[in-house]
Image: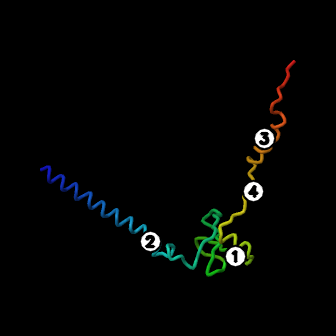
Amino acid sequence: MNGDILSSITTVFSALALVLGIFLVGLYVTPYVRGRGARGGWIKVLAASDLGGKRTIAVVEVVEEVLVLGISPQQISFLSKVENPEIVRRLRTDERPQPPVSFLTYLERLTAKMAKPYQGKEEIHA
C-alpha cells in the first residue's frame, strides 16, 4: 500500500516538473520567436510616455530613422521625425535629460540654506 502511494506521488511530481520545464522553456524562447531576443530587430522603442486614456507617445527607431508616434487603441499616428543628430545620439545611448527639481526638493534646499547661519548660535532669553 505504501509503495502505491509513493509511486503515485512520484508520478504526480514528475508530471508537474515536466509541465513547469516546458513552461519555462516557452518563456525563454518566446522573445526570440517574436523578434526581440538575440536577433535584435529592425524596430526599437527608444522611449515611450503614457498620456492616460490608453494613449502613448513613443520614440521609435525604424531602419536608422527616429520617428515620434502617437499610439491609441484605434490607430498609430506619425507625429514627427527626429533629424537633429545630437538628439538622435542621445536617444540611442539612452542619455536622458535631467528632470526638473521638484518643489519639495527646492524647499528642502532653501530651508537648509536658511538654517546654516543659525547653526551654533543659541538664543538668549531674558
Q: Position of residue 114 (x, y in %)?
A: 83, 39
The residue where tag 2 is placed is 30
The x and y percentages for residue 88 are 70, 74
Label 2: element kind:
helix
Q: Earlier in the sequence, mark 1 or mark 3?
A: 1
Residue sticking out furthest to the bottom: 63
- Check whether the beta carbons of the residues at disc 3 and disc 4 lie within 8 A of each other: no
Q: Crowdedness of circle 4 by 10 Å Cα count: few (<14), some, many (20+)?
A: few
Label 3 vs 2, first from the N-terminus: 2
Q: Nearer the viewer, mark 1 or mark 3?
A: 3
- The residue that appears at 70% across and 70% down in the rendered structure is 90
Name the kind of residue labelled 1 in the image: Leu
- Residue at image point 72% right, 72% down: 87
For disc 3, the marked residue is 112
Residue 10 in the figure: left or right of residue 21 = left
Helix, strand or loop for disc 4: loop
Q: Amino acid at mark 3?
A: Ala
Separation (CA) of disc 2 from disc 4: 39 Å
Q: Hey, what amino acid is under mark 2?
A: Thr
Q: How much space separates mark 1 and mark 4, taking CA atoms?
A: 25 Å
- Residue furthest front as drawn: 120
When asked about the image quadrant of residue 122, the answer is top right
The image quadrant that residue 121 belongs to is: top right
Relative placement, left or right, of 126 versus 98 is right
- Disc 2 or 1, which lies upstream in sequence? 2
